[in-house]
Image (spheres, rainbow, N blue to C red):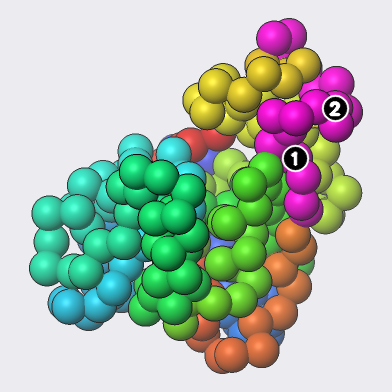
Amino acid sequence: MSYIEQSYQKAFTTLQKKFTKRGMEVYYCATKEDAKNQVLSLIPEGASVTWGGSESMVEAGVRDAVCSGNYTVIDRKSASNPAEARELYGRIVCADYFLTSTNAFTKDGELVNIDGASNRVACIAHGPANVIVLASMDKMCTSVDDAVKRVRTLAAPPNALRVGADTPCAQTGICGDCVSPDCICCQILVTRFSRVPGRIKVVFCAEKLGF
Ligand code: SF4
């Protein structure tokens, strides 16, 4: 086992206590494959499942597994017009399971997410009965401030490219602290406590996922 993996395992012992104290369930997986299986094991067959934009869920193969599994899949991208999108969003907020990654998390057990359209942060905060968060361990930060800096420096620029946003970071690779129409940093959500015990389940993965 590499020194990084050993370090992650030790860190998880602390993270487990911090997140549990904040009402969240946590799991630790060494590989993407284990993480995928862990996520799937948390979702009962027949459940309605939806997601926010998450490169981590795609890379781990969760998205494909859910789409080909025995679930009621609600895909917001399947809407063909604004009215349909609105109707779908109504179903999304009432879904059994919402799958997402987190842009960053702190060593004290807080999730930090920054969003443009903000459907993702909205569903993390409230709505779906369960939220499963897939987080690679390299997203650990020392504080909320550090997490926001990480997202604006390392996550948002490639994300802006991924979604085709016309933002300064997409053009230069560096955050320009924009308020442009395509800004993907409209809302910052710090999840510091889940009042519904276990509603948020965080699956940590030692292998790098997403941005
Ligand atoms: S340039 Fe705008 S969209 Fe890009 S990281 Fe900065 S605030 Fe976010």
Mark 1 neighbour density, 10 Å: few (under 14) some (14–19) many (20 or more): many
Screen quadrant of the N terminus: top left
Mark yes or no: residue 107 visible: no
Q: Does residue 113 show up magenta in the picture?
A: no
Q: How crowded is mark 2: few (under 14 residues within 10 Å), some or many (20 or more)?
A: some
- Identify the mark at residue 58; answer none if there is no mark: none
Q: In which quarter of the image is residue 34?
A: bottom left
Q: Label 2, secondary structure: give it.
A: loop
Q: Position of residue 98 (x, y in %)?
A: 43, 66
Q: What residue type is labelled 2?
A: Cys
Which residues fall within the magenta stretch?
171-188
The amino acid on which the numbered mark 1 sits, given as a three-letter code, is Cys
Taking the spot 51% from the left edge, 25% from the top edge, the residue there is 162
Residue at position x 11%, y 68% in the image: 70
Majority secondary structure in the magenta region: loop
Mark 2 within 8 Å of ligand 1, using the beta carbon? yes
Above or below for 93 versus 69? below
Residue occupied by mark 1: 185
In contact (CB < 8 Å): disc 2 and disc 1: yes
Which mark is drawn over residue 178? Answer: 2
Image-quadrant location for residue 123:
bottom right
Q: Is label 1's Cβ within 8 Å of ligand 1?
A: yes
Q: What's the CA distance linking mark 2 and mark 1? A: 8 Å
